[in-house]
Image (cartoon, rainbow, N blue to C red):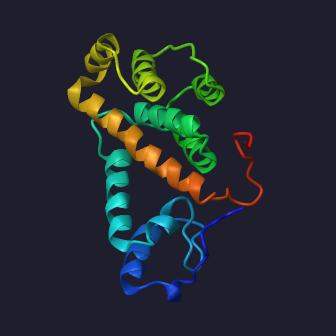
Amino acid sequence: MERLTRRGYEALSDEQKAVFDDIARGRNNVEDGHIGGPFDAWILNAEMGRRIVGLGGLFRFRTLVDRRYIELAILITGAHWRAQYEWFAHAPMAREAGLPQQVIDAIKRGDEPAFDDEGDEAAWHLVRELVDTHQVSDATFARAVACFGEQGVAELVNVCGYYTMVSMTLNTFKVPLPDGAEYPFEER
């Protein structure tokens, strides 16, 4: 059950309305005072919401690393947190970015995929090792740098941190999926 109190647009402060309007621009299914996903929780503090959304835009649209590998990192992070909404939103984006369905399915199950792409494999090992052990070995780091460069590794690692925050927000506020959508993970 969703935990965040629904507020109408008129109940938002002027600052919250400005952030709401910026986020809602170009989105479908925006309701009176409700955007969905983590956004409604974020705009409780309008400045925080504006900054978080700006950072998310950077990670989603302005990285050196190809979108395919960014989405792979997002899926691993979302699966680790069992973030229902995150998986619901990003599995289709990962497919659209070229990540094979068998890789997506393996990530959801928590299995190591069979890789046909060196970048998928390097990103998977980097992110899984970081999520599982909270560290990255020299060998994994070197392999990731060989594929993505130092800037690319920094981007992938920071994407994981950002989507950990997203997942924590979604899970804490129990953000529901749209009506009729199938939840990807069993509830605990």
Residue 162: give x, y in percent of width and height.
Answer: 39, 46
Above or below, 149 against 174 in this view is above
Residue found at x 27% / y 14%: 142
Residue 62: give x, y in percent of width and height.
Answer: 29, 46
Task: Report the quarter where the N terminus lies.
Answer: bottom right
Residue found at x 58% / y 39%: 91
**With 170 as the anchor, is 186 left or right in this view?**
right
Above or below, 97 against 138 in this view is below
Above or below, 36 against 9 in this view is above
**With 43 as the anchor, is 141 left or right in this view?**
left
Outermost residue, right side: 180
Q: Nearer the viewer, residue 16 or 133?
A: 133
Q: Nearer the viewer, residue 112 or 45?
A: 45
Outermost residue, left side: 150
Q: Nearer the viewer, residue 50 or 81?
A: 81
Residue 127: give x, y in percent of width and height.
Answer: 43, 27
Residue found at x 54% / y 40%: 78
Residue found at x 41% / y 15%: 118
Q: Nearer the viewer, residue 27 or 83?
A: 83
Place residue 150 in its image quadrant.
top left
Place residue 148 in its image quadrant.
top left
Task: Report the quarter where the C terminus lies.
Answer: top right
